């Protein structure tokens, strides 16, 4: 499936995700496997390899479902860099002169085992 898409298998990383739970009393321990193409980016999840579906039984350590239904172009890797050391100003969208100011208070408070976040954001025009 990877070769059919013209991708370098050494640049493919696959990861397991939940297939969900639908209330079965007894079921297999399964994971859905999604693959991503890392060539040209350090941002793992921005280049998914679509159309391939794998489900793995974790107890048996075997693939129980596999399909290669369609081919979708893999997104480009350019412009997906997120590491601060690689960033160039500006570091986000322009606010068109609207400064954002945080109050002097902390943005959260602790109470026992509860964290409460402040939802106030002051914008001055």
Image (cartoon, rainbow, N blue to C red):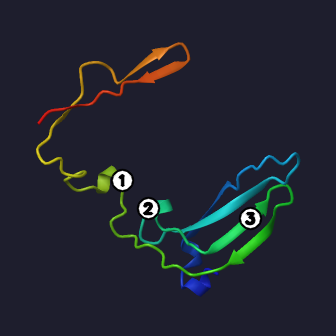
Residue 68 percent coordinates (x, y): 67, 79
Depth check: 123 or 18 in front?
123
Mark 3 or mark 2: which is in front?
Answer: 3
Residue closest to the far top: 112
Of labels 1 and 2, earlier in sequence is: 2
Q: Residue at x 55, y 79 (%)?
A: 8
Cα distance between the residues tagged 1 and 3: 32 Å
Q: Which mark is residue 55?
A: 3
- Image marks 1 and 2: residues in contact by CB distance under 8 Å: yes
Q: Label 1, on which residue?
A: 83
Q: So how many labels did they put on this image? A: 3
Of helix, strand and loop, which one carries label 2?
Answer: loop
Cα distance between the residues tagged 3 and 2: 26 Å
Q: Name the quadrant containing residue 41.
A: bottom left
Residue 66 percent coordinates (x, y): 74, 73
Of labels 3 and 2, earlier in sequence is: 2
Q: Residue at x 49, y 61 (%)?
A: 44
Of helix, strand and loop, which one carries label 1?
Answer: loop
Q: Label 2, on which residue?
A: 42
Depth check: 98 or 75 in front?
98
- Image marks 3 and 2: residues in contact by CB distance under 8 Å: no
């Amino acid at each position: 499936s990877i070769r059919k898409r013209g991708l370098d298998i050494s640049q493919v990383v696959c990861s397991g995700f939940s297939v969900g739970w639908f209330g079965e009393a007894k079921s297999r321990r399964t994971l859905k496997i999604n693959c991503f193409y890392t060539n040209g980016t350090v941002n793992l999840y921005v280049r998914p390899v679509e159309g391939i579906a794998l489900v793995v039984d974790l107890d048996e350590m075997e693939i129980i479902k596999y399909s290669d239904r369609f081919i979708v172009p893999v997104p480009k890797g350019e412009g997906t860099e997120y590491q601060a050391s690689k960033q160039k100003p500006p570091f986000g969208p322009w606010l068109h002169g609207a400064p954002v100011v945080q109050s002097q208070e902390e943005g959260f408070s602790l109470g026992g085992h509860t964290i409460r976040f402040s939802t106030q954001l002051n914008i001055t025009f």
